[in-house]
Amino acid sequence: MTVRRSTLYDPADPPPGVRLRLGVVAAALHVTVTELAGAASLPRPSLYRLLTNEWPARAKPAERAAIRAAIEALLVTHGATQAQIATLWHAYGGHGAPYRAEAAASPEVQTTTQPEEPEMLLPKQALSPQARRHFKLFTNPFDGEVQRDEHFFSGDDMRYVREAAWQCSQNGGFAAIVGESGAGKTTVLADLEARLQAEARGVIVIRPSVLGMEESNAKGQMLKSTDILHAVITTLQPEATVPQTLQARTVRAAKMLTSSAEAGATHLLVIEEAHGLPDHTLKHLKRLHELRLGRRNLLGILLLAQPELKLRLANGLRTGVLREVAQRVEIVELLPLDADLRGYLQCRAEAAGAKLADLADDGAVEALRTRLTRKTSTGAVSMCYPLAVNNMMTRALNMAAEIGAPTVTRDVIGAI
């Protein structure tokens, strides 16, 4: 294979932005991004950047070395050879060997590359004008945005998650909705807020946030208990002066929550991307949840997080670091669609004024489920989440229109 290189560099020491062999080796060993991120104690977005040699900006050399060692140890447990480990941090395609002088002088370099693993997940897809005309669609049924009730698919699993979020808002519970990126956490939260507005239950939603929230200031910006108390005070009384000390903020927030509860209000603290919360903030959440008016909790807490939070709580329970939190928070998992896949596709098609049978045949649905399932050493792992399904179906509709197929078929899915 002939590859033209516009910029020459040593593959053993690539610059930022160059794809590393780490991702290829991990895929070959069936190690997921979630597993890599857990081993490295990094959030998934940071791990994705690491695959292209972009390290956390504030990571010191010792921290980088620790991350490398943790990832290498994980891959070794999955069967990585010494040859694979030796080239993990080299540029993909370079085989770890610096370019020879004669190769650098030549405008074309002969390289032999390994075939890449097929990508399971796709970036955001847009329905082409050709596909709109071909399938007589005015809107993309699989654009992913739930803007109306008819767009919201409520299978058995989603009904359970939806009810868990509702009960947390009504009874002052402490719950964490956990799911992969694209599993529907934001959709669940939007549905909850819409229900609260429609039913006028007097629930005050408090949503603290920090841009670039991470577990430590070395990686981004931590969300601290002082920030949460600030959000409580300013939500209940926007013009209030916020005390500067933690003690004063705690007292002020408790008094305001008590007064608001006596007036008949219920309070729900919602934190998105909660897998980025530091341990000490998670511990403080438990103490906030213990604020009561008689037997009534003054503050319900709803966390939305990726699976890293479940892993951290499990580890924290074992080590004792987060024991009190792990024993009190209810983990509610958003599972892949799998058995509900046909119902989901049918719901989205009907919401756009179409019929699923006019867009895809029976074989395509099963092929889509298979396409979004990865075999690993511990069993099959499904990535059949709404966002992945939406992008795959949009790509399939575009491809079917390009080749003139009347509907999406098994062969169309297989060609993606």
Image: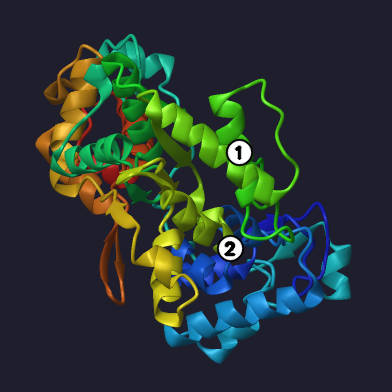
Label placed on residue 131: none
Q: Position of residue 274 (x, y in %)?
A: 50, 50
In the image, is residue 135 above or below residue 234? above
Q: Is residue 277 left or right of residue 183?
A: right
Q: Where the C terminus falls, by quadrant? A: top left
- Residue drawn at x 41%, y 36% as measured from the top left: 268
Q: Mark 2 — residue? A: 280
Q: Which residue is at 40% across, 80% downward?
A: 318
Q: Amino acid at mark 1?
A: Arg
Residue found at x 68% / y 70%: 94
The residue to which callout 1 is attached is 252
Q: Quadrant of residue 55?
A: bottom right
User: Quadrant location of the N terminus?
Assistant: bottom right
Q: Is residue 288 left or right of residue 96?
A: left
Under tag 2, what secondary structure? helix
Q: Secondary structure at mark 1?
A: helix
- Image side of residue 359 versus residue 25, left or right: left
Indicate left or right for 342 with 84 as reference.
left
**Above or below for 42 versus 122:** below
Q: Is residue 158 visible?
A: yes
Question: For the point 64% across and 85% down, which residue is it?
Answer: 86
The image quarter containing residue 73 is bottom right
Name the spot of residue 306 as percent of width and height, x first: 43, 53
Q: CA distance from mark 1 to mark 2?
A: 21 Å
Figure quadrant of residue 407: top left
